[in-house]
Image (cartoon, rainbow, N blue to C red):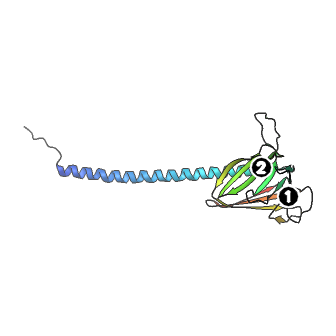
Amino acid sequence: MPRQRGFTLLEIIIAVGIFAVVSALAYGGLNSILRASQHTQAASQALQRLQLAMSLIHQDLTQVVFRPITNEFGEQEPALFTPQDATLALSFTRRGWKNPANQTRATLQRVAYALEDGQLYRQYWFHLDRAPNEQPIRMPLLKGVSELKLRFLDSQKEWRERWPPLSMTTQPVPLPKAVEITLVTEQWGDIQRLFPL
């Protein structure tokens, strides 16, 4: 009767060891692929947020219209200006506010941009000439913004840091010829755009 042979204990230990080494290598490769995929996805989402923010800024500033407003305190505000308070960086009136629901409202919209705690916000009001205590609708646009720089090109082709400049006495305040925006971001560095008006 032929003798049946099986695996010895030593052969089983060697096979298990080889399987363990191959499994460890495969897990390491899979783990690095998953980590790379997560980093790529996070970078892609950050880029989408940046593109959305820049797209909204572009849409707003290419639609600027000369329409001064009356704010909630009954004071006249220029069509475009940099407010004195620290909460808003830029405020202006734009055209082209879509109205798919046919609400009773204008197609003009008052928009403002604000930078608070490293986050860029876009806000707007439902009415151009605001009632007392009317609150804006705020939308966070972009995180990781350390600074928002603005420059305005006047009719003499000189760049101004504020609009209207303190030296301007013209009433009503005209629109600048162009607006330059620079976003200083943690992830993307300085992003600069020029918008002719």
Q: Residue 74, percent across and down?
A: 85, 50
Q: Amino acid at mark 1?
A: Lys
Q: Residue furthest left?
A: 1
Element class at badge 2: strand
* Residue at 54% over, 52% down: 40
Image height of 41 relative to 170, above or below: above
Point out the frontmost of discs 1 and 2: 2
Q: Residue at the spot x=67%, y=50% of the render?
A: 140
Q: For the point 81% across and 62% down, which residue is it?
A: 162
Q: Name the quarter where the C terminus is drawn.
A: bottom right
- Where residue 98 sits, quadrant-wise, is top right
Decide: is 178 above or below 131.
Answer: below
| Nearer to us in this view, 5 or 100 | 100
Q: What residue is pinned by disc 1?
A: 177
Lateral position of residue 117 relative to residue 7, left or right: right
Q: Quadrant of the N terminus?
A: top left
